[in-house]
């Protein structure tokens, strides 16, 4: 089931009502892109959550029957990439009426960086949208990638990064 922005916010509103403590959630991937109005919907819900909020998030999820696919990682990890410590500061606040949940979205350069790790056809489309909508430059992406830790086959990530650089920043004749 695809999740549009309204569905995402409605779901978070239910979680917000069940939460007894403050939680910061940072949307990642398609969830972030949907909240930033770069996509009309996402196929799953992805967050990276500062460590101190994970237990409360898990407790609230247990209280709310939802049946959604929700993936979450901690402290700037997304899929198999660990973003630099400033990921939270760089993330973009999403305005909501939520009282206990502070909602943010990864900065588009961090969305691109995390999508490079897997780099399937959908990721390539999402990277293109981020680059075009936020006027990301080759230097921004390359520079940010130098500060990302990749858990797994580091060389594979570098190959994917070079593919993105060639695919989106090489002048075609």
Image (tube, rainbow, N blue to C red):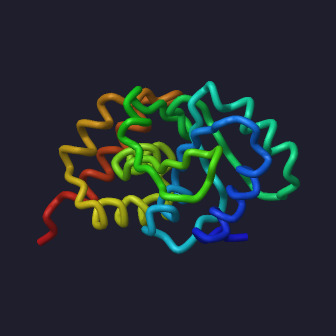
Q: Position of residue 3 (x, y in %)?
A: 65, 68
Q: Position of residue 144 (x, y in %)?
A: 29, 37
In the picture provided, is 122 more to the left or to the right than 172?
Answer: right
* Residue 36 figure quarter: bottom left
Return the residue nearer the eye: 20 or 162.
20
In the picture provided, is 111 more to the left or to the right than 118?
Answer: left
Q: Is residue 78 above or below residue 67?
A: above
Which image quadrant: the N terminus? bottom right
Q: Residue at x 13, y 64 (%)?
A: 171
* Residue 149 figure quarter: top left
Q: Residue at x 77, y 58 (%)?
A: 68
Return the residue nearer the eye: 67 or 113.
67
Which image quadrant: the C terminus? bottom left
Q: Is residue 85 above or below residue 35?
A: above
Q: Position of residue 48 (x, y in %)?
A: 57, 39
Q: Residue at x 52, y 53 (%)?
A: 29
């Amino acid at each position: 089931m695809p999740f549009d922005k309204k569905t995402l916010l409605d779901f978070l509103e239910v979680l917000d009502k069940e939460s007894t403590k403050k939680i910061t959630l940072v949307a990642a991937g398609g969830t972030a892109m949907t909240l930033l109005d770069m996509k009309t919907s996402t196929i799953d819900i992805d967050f990276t959550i500062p460590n101190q909020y994970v237990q409360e998030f898990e407790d609230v999820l247990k209280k709310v029957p939802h049946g959604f696919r929700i993936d979450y990682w901690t402290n700037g990890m997304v899929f198999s990439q660990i973003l630099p410590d400033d990921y939270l500061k760089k993330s973009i606040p999403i305005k909501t009426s939520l009282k206990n949940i502070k909602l943010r979205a990864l900065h588009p350069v961090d969305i691109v960086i995390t999508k490079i790790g897997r780099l399937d056809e959908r990721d390539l489309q999402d990277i293109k949208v981020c680059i075009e909508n936020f006027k990301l430059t080759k230097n921004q992406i390359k520079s940010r990638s130098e500060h990302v830790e990749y858990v797994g086959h580091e060389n594979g990530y570098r190959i994917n990064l070079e593919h993105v650089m060639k695919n989106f920043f090489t002048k075609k004749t």
